[in-house]
Amino acid sequence: MADFRASAQRLHQRITTWRRDLHGIPETGVDTPQTEAYICAELDKIGVSYRKGLGKHGVVALVEGKHKNRVFAIRADMDGLPIKEETGLPFASQNGCMHACGHDAHAAMGLASVKLLHDVREKIEGSVLVVFQPGEEGCTDGPGGAKRMLDDGAFDDPKPDAMVGLHTGCNEAKGQTWPHHNSRFDIDEDVLWIGPAVMATMAFDWLKKQA
Ligand SMILES: [Zn+2]
């Protein structure tokens, strides 16, 4: 059994850095080249294989466990919004757009899920696809990022048998309730390690049950 809780907690600082770095470079729609490059550079450091340029700038990482014929997928979105950031946070975006929906946290948690699972890949009863999807907020010039990634073959090989996604919320955050000013961005950063620990556990346990 893999103890994702403990290993995710140990990764907390690195996940926080990923989230804050991504928070500083928000891009909108499917035009997310800088975000794609950042994610790919981190996947290279982790040492996992991936495909990029899907749905324009989507990325699909593959953690290869014991088999390639049973596949669980984890999905994280990665696009920001055309909103000017006025939070005054030290890692605030300066480019006129903003990660105001939490997709910076989602992409960071996607990277963390890759890392957690990659570290125990010999024990996984299948493989795990981790999807980084642009254009979740929609696009002005056609379909959203999910359809574009599928059209580009994101799920052609391997094809996932089950999939999980996660979205951060704010209703429980630090005693403040959305839409209270800034409460959306004052996220409790513990979610950054709890989220991937949950997703990695779901992937690991689901694949074990199919074995
Ligand atoms: Zn969102």
Image: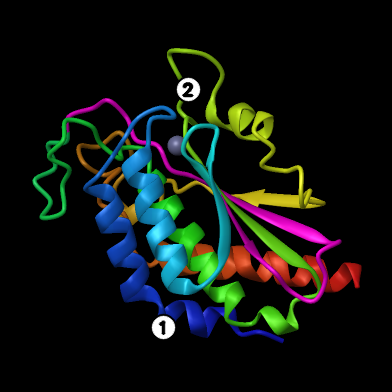
Q: Reply yes or no: does residue 79 show up in magenta.
A: yes
Please tell me in which quarter of the rendered image ligand 1 is found. Answer: top left
Residue 157 on image: x %, y %: 76, 49
Residue labelled with disc 1 = 10
Q: Amino acid at mark 2?
A: Gly
Magenta stretch in the rendered image: 60-84
Tell me if I can see residue 50 in this picture: yes
**Which of the colour schemes (rainbow, by chain, secondary structure, one colour) is used?**
rainbow
Judging by the rendered image, the residue that carries numbered circle 2 is 138
- Where is residue 29? Give x, y as percent: 41, 27
At 32% across and 30% down in the image, what residue appears?
81
Q: Residue furthest right?
A: 211
Q: For the point 83% across and 74% down, which residue is it? A: 208
Snapshot quadrant of residue 209: bottom right
Name which residue type carries label 1: Arg
Q: Nearer the viewer, mark 2 or mark 1?
A: 2
Furthest residue in direction top, as rendered: 141
Describe the element under mark 1 as helix, strand or loop.
Answer: helix
> If you read the primary sequence from the N terminus, does the residue marked by circle 2 or circle 1 appear first?
1
